[in-house]
Amino acid sequence: MIKHDAIIIGTGQSGPALAERLTQAGMNTAIIERKLFGGTCVNVGCIPTKALVASARAAYIARRGLEFGVVIENPVIVDMKRVKARKDEIAGASNKGVTAWLEGLDNLTIYRGHAYFEDNRVISVNGEQLEADKIFINTGGRATVPDMPGLDQVDYLTNSSMMDMDYLPEHLIIVGGSYIGLEFAQMYRRFGSEVTVVEMGDRLIARDDKDLSDSVKEIVENEGVNVRLNAECITVAKQGDQIAVSLSCDEQPKQVLGSHLLLAVGRRPNTDDLGLENTGIESDERGYIKVDDHLETNVSGIWAIGDVNGRGAFTHTSYNDFEIVAANLLDDDLRKLSDRFLCYGLFIDPPLGRVGMTEQQARESGRRVLIGKRMMNRVGRARERSETQGFIKVLVDADSEEILGAAILGINGDEAIHCLIDIMYAGMPYTVIQRAVHIHPTVAELIPTTLGDLKPLQ
């Protein structure tokens, strides 16, 4: 039995930062990683996918050159091997950075292998047994593979295996019309593939408001992405050298033929092979570990941080989990999960930045709500860049004047949304930003204008 003061399972966004703080506090700490240092974001998520998004945007802008008075005489050619090499270099540098960071920490022992709980305090890895009074589960998640008829008969891709592609699919069929699926859809359409998105629901990004769903659908369709909604019963089959996806749709045709299939129907936590059944740790029906307002499980001395707790599933929420745990455990600074505003981005082009309540949630809250909305075609920055799709929308409590939620779908929307996020965290009324003077010409300068034209939410 090897005794440590603390054990961290997983090196995703929360793990390395927590390891540094724990070791700096004098704790003899172990960290366990069975695959790649840095977790999803560094290796197969945010960093590599956004590198691909950037390459796809470069191709898109090159094809539009004539609109801006730039003449490109030859057809734009996308070299997918170079695209992948650039992505690999960027992601690889991040992976090496995390690895060097951890290997350079004093008082930290690194175990490369699979962690398995023997009981509430003992974890086995590579035939050794580790024990600690403080254990932090940071095992992340992976793509969900649905129980889809015929799936065992065809080859399919997930967001992780897509990172290995250095060629262009002739026709990429994507099952799933939410954030991951849409980013790959636009990206590969811009690279030159035919792309079809198949979504079981009646609209894309179903957790967002309908006006956002409709606008996002229009954006990707304008670039040539085929969207099939209401696919209630999806089956797949091999048909020659192609993959046939059969749909139960009102529209025709009822079958789509493609060369490659990407599954983007959600994520699941990496908890099924941790040995949680040997502990008293509680999880929900989907496998996410239950935590309290300080990220601690029902078993004292065991925390679950990052995607594995189902309380955010984003890189930024994972890092905030670390901040909450470190503040409470090491800094005598009471921080709570419930203080966090939900915010996230959809990194299609133009991007979507979101924070707080949706319009539907505001309606259901029982509050008197004001709404302000401004189309991006009235924003100078958008017109200058000839990217006028989308809108700004802000929801305000009519009585307290607090901002309840906002969405900015449009050029720089993923950055401009932070003006509103910061006001929400400051606990200030919307009038603070409504009276602020912003720089012209920017997207953010239209936020005060939008807030100056609030109307009751009908």
Image (tube, rainbow, N blue to C red):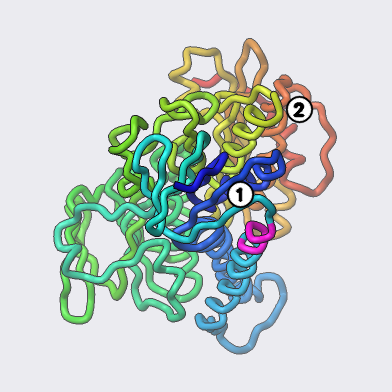
Residue wearing tag 2:
434
Point 61% across, 32% down: residue: 324
Q: In the image, 126: left or right of 378?
A: left
Q: Position of residue 139 (x, y in %)?
A: 45, 48
- Residue kind at label 2, given as amino acid type: Gln
Q: In which quarter of the view is residue 452 placed?
A: top right
Q: Position of residue 293 (x, y in %)?
A: 52, 24
Residue wearing tag 1:
410
Callout 1: few (<14), some (14-19), or many (20+) C-alpha neighbours within 10 Å? many
Q: Is residue 405 visible?
A: yes
Give the SS element for disc 2.
Answer: helix
Residue bounds of the magenta highlight: 99-104
CB contact under 8 Å: marks 1 and 2:
no
Point 80% across, 49% down: residue: 441
In this view, 158 is above or below 407? below
Q: In which quarter of the view is residue 419 placed?
A: top right
Point 69% across, 53% down: residue: 106
In the image, residue 438 lies in the stretch drawn in magenta: no
- Residue kind at label 1, given as amino acid type: Gly
Give the SS element for disc 1.
Answer: loop
Q: Is residue 391 visible?
A: no
Q: Position of residue 457 (x, y in %)?
A: 53, 21
Q: In the image, 437: left or right of 69?
A: right
Q: In which quarter of the view is residue 73 placed?
A: bottom right
First along the sequence among labels 1 and 2:
1
- Magenta-drawn stretch, dominant element (helix, strand or loop): helix
